[in-house]
Image (cartoon, rainbow, N blue to C red):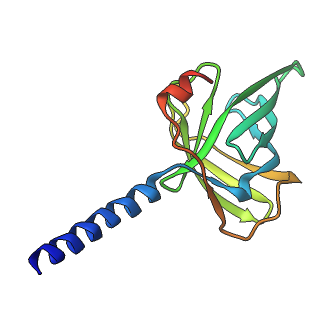
Amino acid sequence: MKQICWTVLLIALLGCEAISDANQRPSIDVKLIGVWEGKYTEPGGSIKSWTQTRKADGGYLIEFSFTELDGTKKHFSESGRWWIKDGLFHELASSDMEQPDKYQYQFKKLDCVNFALIDSAELPEGLESYEFSECLMKDGPVVSAGETTKIPVITSKMVAGI
């Protein structure tokens, strides 16, 4: 009888650990899949605008356009991986980042989301906070509100291969 009780207790404890681990795995918030547009005015007055495509497989592509005060425009693109972990949006550019930027995010409306940077190795000096909004231009797949999809755990080996 004692052996059965110990076995049941062990299974229950291992089950709790598995549930805890599952809650910490990266996932994709399907409401963020699609083509999004954003705009941000830099402290010096330059305007940064972008179109970001987030895919269901965790990949993204951003097309940036910077407009300087004198009207000069610069364009470049960035690609990488995105995921949700611990309720935060993570974004890791494949070209040069070792650690992801982490953002709190909240939907203002069904088709617009606010982001607030909370952790970044790339935050420019003198910039105390970075917040912006993006609005959906082209929908991703139709999903239920609050739905998320689990993705494989992103490892440092995977990041190095980006």
Q: Is 29 placed above or below 129 here?
A: below
Left or right placement of residue 48 versus residue 73 in this view: left
As drawn, which residue projects farthest toward the left? 2
Judge by depth and name the residue closer to the eye, 4 or 28: 4
Left or right placement of residue 75 versus residue 89 in this view: right
Q: Residue at x 53, y 49 (%)?
A: 26
Q: Residue at x 13, y 73 (%)?
A: 3
Please indicate, yes or no, whether residue 121 appears anywhere in the rendered image.
Answer: no
Position in image of residue 149 (x %, y %): 64, 57
Position in image of residue 33 (x %, y %): 76, 51
Q: Is 119 placed above or below 137 here?
A: above
Quadrant housing the C terminus: top right
Q: Residue at x 54, y 34 (%)?
A: 100
As drawn, which residue projects farthest toward the bottom? 1
Position in image of residue 61 (x %, y %): 77, 33
Judge by depth and name the residue closer to the eye, 83 or 47: 83
For residue 31, which quarter of the picture?
bottom right
Position in image of residue 70 (x %, y %): 87, 20
Please indicate, yes or no, whether residue 96 appears anywhere in the rendered image.
Answer: yes
Q: Is 142 placed above or below 134 here?
A: below
Q: Is 41 placed above or below 8 here?
A: above
Judge by depth and name the residue closer to the eye, 45 or 33: 33
